[in-house]
Amino acid sequence: MADFSEERQIFTEFLKRKGLKTTRERTALLKEIFSTHKHFDADDLVDRMREAGGQKVSRATVYRTLELLHECGLVGRVRLNEEKYRYERLRKGEHHDHLICTACGKVMEFVEPRIEELQEEVCKRWDFHPISHAHQIRGLCSICHRKAEKGRPERPPA
């Protein structure tokens, strides 16, 4: 089990500033999220909590807690479509960007130092002091691209 004491402290202090309590359910959700590094949606998290047994957490609590975790910077989210997000835990010092398949919803992580350097140059040029950023490239994964290519009609010879 990964240590998430620093994240628990950040979340507890965040909740206190907002006048909210650190409940058993919120702590259990935080523990479950930081036990692995996978992208998930709220329904995945509900299922994981049910499979883990012990702690029962309502779907509404999951959604509210994910929003709070996102707001305090411990959980990142990627919009898949108009009504669905995928989430992931964020740890201090870890950074990556995303490739998102608009057909199947697959989310792939990547790190590209040249992109990071370019962002730093742009911020310096504009005298801008960034706090965070999220870089997402949307398109088709290789599997969905091949499926789309097979579905296209043949072009007649010129």
Image (cartoon, rainbow, N blue to C red):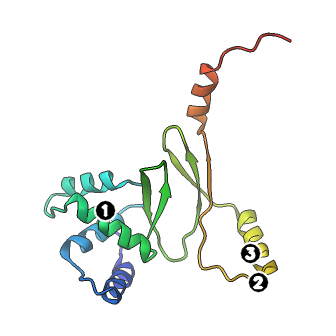
Residue, x 44% and y 61% (percent of image)?
88
> Contact (CB < 8 A) between labels 2 and 3?
no
Horizontal and vertical percent for residue 80?
49, 49
SS state under label 3: helix
The image position of residue 37, as x and y in percent, is 43, 60
Depth check: give the residue in front, 96 or 123.
123
User: What residue would you read off at disc 3?
Assistant: 120
Q: Which residue is mark 1?
A: 63
Q: Amino acid at mark 3?
A: Glu
Amino acid type, label 1: Tyr
Secondary-structure class at tag 1: helix
The local crowd at label 3, few if under 14, some if 14 to 19, many if 20 or more residues have their Cα within 10 Å, is some
Image marks 3 and 1: residues in contact by CB distance under 8 Å:
no
Quadrant that contains the N terminus: bottom left
Counting other residues with Cα less than 10 Å from the Cα at mark 1, is it few (<14), some (14-19), or many (20 or more)?
some
Q: Nearer the viewer, residue 21 or 88?
A: 21
What residue is shown at x 20% (from left), y 53% (from top)?
51
